[in-house]
Image: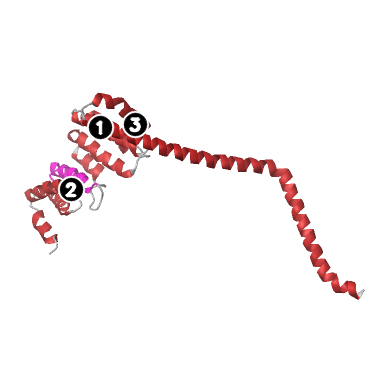
């Protein structure tokens, strides 16, 4: 009896472990019997979705590569003056292109219309890019500036200011282009001080293209802002 009592704790511990393992197996079997087919279906579905994503990504990359080649070929045709041969492929890319290729195709269509002095048609094409929420923001911002440029003569000065002022900020990617149009609109409203200050900031911004800065220097000077002197002061000694 003492011998039995001596081994009881170990026996009980082993027995409990065995019961616990058996219970777990029973629960697992019950779960599998009840949910096994659903679980297999979920796993298969998950694998199918994952495989589909991989295929889709591969197709998108392949499609993007093909569209890049198409766009390059169209630029070559346009450069040689063969606009007719580029028209249909350009329209296809503008409608069905992937990402930036669609935006570039629309930009090209708009620029062709600008060259033909079709300002209304060009503005509409630029507006397509500006309003395309799937396009990259720099594309949309530039398209809005180009749309405003095409519509400039038909827009009220305040409309130009309201539309482009968020982009006419020093340090912004399109500060020079947007700022110049805003400053001219301010001049039309006789806001000479505001226009002069803005032209001066454009002239002092080293990231703005040189040709635009030179125009800004001249305009700032006409408005009493000595941008040349301020630029000289900023140059390293």
Q: Report crowding for label 2: few under 14, some 14 to 19, many 20 or more residues within 10 A (C-alpha).
A: few
Quadrant of residue 99 in the image? top left
- According to the picture, the residue beneath numbered tag 1 turns out to be 76
Residue matched to label 3: 93
Can residue 226 be seen in the rendering of this structure? no
Secondary element at image label 2? loop
Which residue is at a point 82% across and 66% down the rendered structure image?
12
The relative height of residue 160 versus residue 82 in the rendered view (above or below) is below
User: Element at badge 1?
Assistant: helix
Q: Where the C terminus falls, by quadrant?
A: bottom left
Q: Residues within 10 Å of mark 3 (few under 14, many from 20)?
A: many
The segment highlighted magenta reads 174-191
Q: Nearer the viewer, residue 38 or 197?
A: 38
Query: SS at mark 3?
Result: helix
x and y percentages locating residue 136 in the rendered image: 34, 43
Residue 227, above or below 111: below
Q: Is residue 209 magenta?
A: no
Residue named by callout 2: 209
Q: Residue furthest right?
A: 1
**Residue at 11 percent of width and 48 percent of height:** 214
The answer to which of marks 2 and 1 sits earlier in the sequence is 1
181 in magenta = yes
Q: Would residue 228 appear left or right of 80 to someone viewing this image? A: left
Residue 78 in the image: state x and y as whole percent: 23, 30
In this view, the mark in front (2 or 1) = 1
Task: Compare marks 1 and 3 and give the one earlier in the sequence.
Answer: 1
Res. 22 mark: none
User: Quarter-wise, where is residue 38 in the image?
Assistant: top right
Magenta stretch mostly in which secondary structure? helix
């Amino acid at each position: 009896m003492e011998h039995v009592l001596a081994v009881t704790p170990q026996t009980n511990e082993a027995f409990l472990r065995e019961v616990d393992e058996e219970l777990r197996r029973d629960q697992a079997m019950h779960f599998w019997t009840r949910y096994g087919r659903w679980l297999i279906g979920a796993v298969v579905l998950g694998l199918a979705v994952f495989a589909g994503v991989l295929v889709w990504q591969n197709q998108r990359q392949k499609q993007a590569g093909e569209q890049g080649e198409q766009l390059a070929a169209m630029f070559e045709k346009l450069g040689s003056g063969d606009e007719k041969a580029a028209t249909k492929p350009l329209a296809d890319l503008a409608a069905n292109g992937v990402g930036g290729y669609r935006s570039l195709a629309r930009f090209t269509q708009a620029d062709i219309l600008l060259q033909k002095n079709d300002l209304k048609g060009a503005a509409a094409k630029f507006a397509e890019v500006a309003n395309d929420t799937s396009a990259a923001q720099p594309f949309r911002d530039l398209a809005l500036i180009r749309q405003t440029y095409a519509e400039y003569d038909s827009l009220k000065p305040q409309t130009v200011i309201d539309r482009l002022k968020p982009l006419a900020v020093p340090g912004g990617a399109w500060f020079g282009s947007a700022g110049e149009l805003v400053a001219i609109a301010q001049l039309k409203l006789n806001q000479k001080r505001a226009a002069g200050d803005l032209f001066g900031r454009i002239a002092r911004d080293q990231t703005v293209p040189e040709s635009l800065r030179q125009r800004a220097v001249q305009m700032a000077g006409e408005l009493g802002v000595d941008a040349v002197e301020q630029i000289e002061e900023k140059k390293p000694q």
